[in-house]
Amino acid sequence: MSDAPHTARIKAFLILGAPGSGKGTQGKVLGSIPRFHHLACGDVFRSLDTRTAIGQKFVEYSSRGELVPDDVTVELWHANLKQRIDSHQFKPEIDFLILDGIPRNVEQARFMEPHIEVLKVFHLSCPDRTELARRLRKRALKDNRFDDANETVIQQRFATYEAETKPILDYYGPDRVFGIDASQAPAKVLYDIIGGVMQLDAWKELEKMKV
């Protein structure tokens, strides 16, 4: 079998937004629709095989309580992606990749550039941080993650997003950023995302294939 799917840049969409904006929810729903494959950053680390060389690199940093460097994070992500292609979970010739939680900063976006062609960044925007904080507290309590419901923790997550993740919007530029009001009902947010996808030439080409 040709390894072309591994070397060709994969058509991808990013879902970007502050904590509590609904990225994970939208990514999971989209991933359940044929021709979309959802890959969240959390999935990469949860499925990590520590027996591999790249898995050992991760253990090396995490065992010291250090943050995993951006290049290693992207290497882990890419290894996971190749695994999904090899097992036919993800077919890049006919599926769009939906990314959520990665890239987390501009440096990761640069490292990922050789592997993916980002067609659109769906920016789930909600200037009302009070509403986002309410959602985060509700989710933390529902999942019994009481530390995550702490106001200081929530504000720190917002600050990290503003400083590290939001600059990704400038990196990809206004032509590729599609703003969506994240304060709407989740079904309406999904409707807006799908509407944005269906405007793209890449989607129209896929429709012609009748896959």
Image (tube, grey):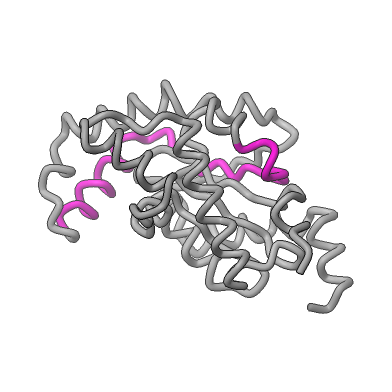
Measured as percent of width and height from the top left, residue 168 is found at 56, 29
Q: How many marks?
A: 0
The residue at 46%/53% (across/down) is 40
The residue at 69%/54% (across/down) is 6
Q: Is residue 18 above or below residue 32?
A: above
Measured as percent of width and height from the top left, residue 192 is found at 61, 56
Q: Nearer the viewer, residue 125 or 170?
A: 170
Measured as percent of width and height from the top left, residue 131 is found at 31, 42
Q: Nearer the viewer, residue 158 or 125?
A: 158
Q: Nearer the viewer, residue 24 or 89?
A: 89
Q: Quadrant of the C terminus?
A: bottom right
Magenta stretch, residue numbers: 112-141
Q: Is residue 42 above or below residue 169?
A: below
Magenta run includes residue 13:
no
Q: Quadrant of the N terminus?
A: bottom right
Q: Is residue 105 left or right of residue 51?
A: right
The residue at 26%/40% (across/down) is 133
Measured as percent of width and height from the top left, residue 151 is found at 16, 34
The residue at the far bottom in this view is 210
Indicate the quadrant where residue 128 lies.
top left
